[in-house]
Amino acid sequence: MGYLDEPRNIAKLRKVFYLSLGIVVLLEFILIKREHIDFSIEHIAEFPAFHAFYGFIACALIILVSKFIGHLFLMKEEDYYD
Amino acid sequence: MIDWIPPAAIFILGGLFIPLFKGRAQKMYILLLPAIAFTSLLSTTHGTNWVYNYLGYELIFGQVDKLTMVFAYVFVIMAFIGMLYALHIKEQGQHISAFLYIGSALGVVFAGDLFSLFIFWEIMAFSSVFLVWYQKDKASIDAGFRYLLVHTAGGLFLLGGIVLRVVETGSIEFGHIGLDGLDSYLILIGFLINAAVPPLHAWLSDTYPEATITGAVFLTAFTTKTAVYVLLRSYSGTEILVYLGAIMALYGVVYAVLENDIRRLLAYHIISQVGYMVAGVGMGAAIIGGFAQMQEVATPGQMLATNGAAAHAFAHILYKGLLFMGAGAVIYMTGKRKLTELGGLYKTMPITLILYMVGAFAISAVPLFSGYVSKTMVIAGAEKSHLTLIFLMLTFASAGTFLHTGLKLPYFTFFAKDSGIRVKEPPLNMLLAMGVAAFMCILIGVYPQMLYNMLPYPVDYHPFTVGHLVGEMQLLLFTAFGFFLLLDKLYGERTISLDTDWFYRKGSNVFMWFINGPLARGSQWPVDVCMRAISFLKWFSKNPVLAIMLFKDSLTLRFFGHIGSRTQTDSIRYLEDEKKHYPRDPVKRNPVGDSLLLALMFMAVYVMYYMFAA
């Protein structure tokens, strides 16, 4: 039996993971003081929680768009070239 | 006074002596060579060394500055790690070709002229293909030939460009080239093929997964990074490279989603990572003169980009080697290479998992691992030069890198479903090699100053600011969040993905059809015509008079229905009889006739010629 065969352990890990998501966003608001927020595209990296949003959106887009294109025409049977 | 030996010579000449040693002595020897090369590097003098006159041109085998040394050090370190990983291999040929390959890559890095650069460039292609062929199955032999064809084509582009350039400038010096004129475009294409820039990249993802387990580790390190080096040297500041690099970074990420083969997934991430370096090359300043003078003219953003490209190449070679070693260890022990066939290996291969994860964290730019201190330099370079689109594209690709290399691959290989495979850890030398690479990844990540001090420009960049750290952790953790939400979309599928190699893999069928069909038939036709003409003339010359009479008679038969006073049936029989007995006896029957006829024919031709032409 491995550690991850136990559902209880997985639930525990999941809680830690969600907690860390919250902490890392909170940290930004605690540690980084901004006098004003510049809403021009040039300073997009300085938007509050920009990296959190961007990471999530990038991840979702990469998976969905790639799989879409893949199933559209890129993915072929394994013996395609034989 | 020259008191160091070019490391290229140590590897190329040293490699040839491998067969003289047996057993343990041989193992010692192949580990000793990189060590000797390393000590040689320590005593290297900057400037122009090892110059030879050849046909009135100066061949330079030791052009050295800080940029050279960054690549030289990491090449030699990686050579040691790769050799340690391959120590259990009994085939000497594999070791020799690896040494030739590494030596020629170093030769390119130290080359100060275009001729010796080209020669080493070609040795690199022809020695590395054996690291593929030693896998000895049909897939690898085919892939090896395709690899060779692509690199030969690339080499020809390079050669064409070099020849044009030498004719134009009269100098074979290798320095800044930049984009002007046909020669510079041809050289750039040659370089871009080796850097695997789409659409010229398919050789990489096609070949590397088919290479031997140990050979692939070498392949990941040298070809593309040598290309990055020559691009840095001669095409820094070329704007198109910024966009090509950013597209490259995304391109590899898109394909990695679709991949089921673990080493092919990693191969697509080489393309993605080299994209950062190519973008960094484009964002830098053209390197004219030494770096000391360059400091005065280059902007901070440009210096950051050039430094970033060099630093990322350094870090990349080590973590990518580590990732390929980890994937190789899994394939070596299980004999399986597809995500759909693997799973649950964490129970029996925990050390491999941990070492692999160090590489995965490094490539994903997790703080305190090497990628974090190098990749963010390139991204910061884009930010500092106000290239917001490039910044966004590169950050996007960063998320994708963690998604595949840090999450998808290890999840489906080591966790997910239990595949029932129970294998042990790989041999000790493999684990040790991975350990050394992992140590380097962490060392650079924790103490980046060591790497920064080697870079061509002085570094004014601080990776461990609160802003950088928090931003990076957000990016990574929320990528992971997306991964777990969309997990059921990510299971490996038993497919392969079409890429630009389709054009030559399927295109070759069209080519072969053309060769076997129209071209073969077309070339046979004139042969047939001539053969028939010959046999006719042979037949005709046996008795020209009778032959002409036969023509006359058969024409008469066709138009009048009979010959002379004979009936139709008699005429036909007569003609057949004459044909059967042809040529009878020409001389007896008409001794003068033949020569007279020939003389008449000649005169007729002459008259025609006289009337119409003269």
Image (cartoon, grey):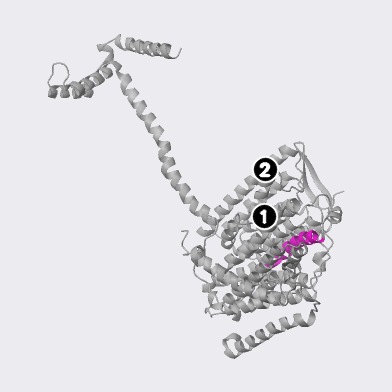
Q: Residue at x 57, y 86 (%)?
A: A5
Q: Is residue B548 visible from the viewing direction of this image?
A: yes
Main secondary structure found in the magenta portion: helix
Specify which label sits upstream in the sequence, 1 or 2: 1
Q: Nearer the viewer, residue B487 or B227?
A: B487
Residue B429 picture location, percent across and down = 67, 69
Residue B205, image x, y percentages: 58, 61
Per the model, the C-alpha gap separating discs 1 and 2 is: 30 Å
Up the image or down, B596 lies above or below A31; here it is above
Chain letter for the residue marked with disc 1 in the picture: B
Quarter residue A23 falls in: bottom right
Q: Position of residue B613 (x, y in %)?
A: 44, 14
Identify which residue is drawn at 49% across, 51% down.
B507
The image quarter containing residue B449 is bottom right
| Number of numbered labels in the structure image | 2
Q: Quadrant of residue A32?
A: bottom right
Answer whether labels 1 and 2 touch (C-beta < 8 Å).
Answer: no
Judge from the rendering whether residue B368 lies leftward or rightward of residue B555; answer left or right: right
Asked if residue B441 shows in the view, the reply is no
Instruction: Report whether mark 1 lies on the same chain as mark 2.
Output: yes
Q: Residues within 10 Å of mark 2 (few under 14, many from 20)?
A: few
User: From the viewer's perspective, is residue B544 above or below residue B21?
Assistant: above
For mark 2, give the secondary structure: helix
- Disc 2 marks which amino acid? Leu
Q: Position of residue B580 (x, y in %)?
A: 22, 24
User: What chain is tagged by disc 2?
Assistant: B
- The numbered mark at residue B182 is 2
| B338 drawn magenta | no
- Residue flagged by tag 1: what amino acid is it? Tyr
Q: Which residue is mark 1?
A: B101
Task: Report the magenta residues as a range.
Answer: B300-319
Foreground: B335 or B240? B240
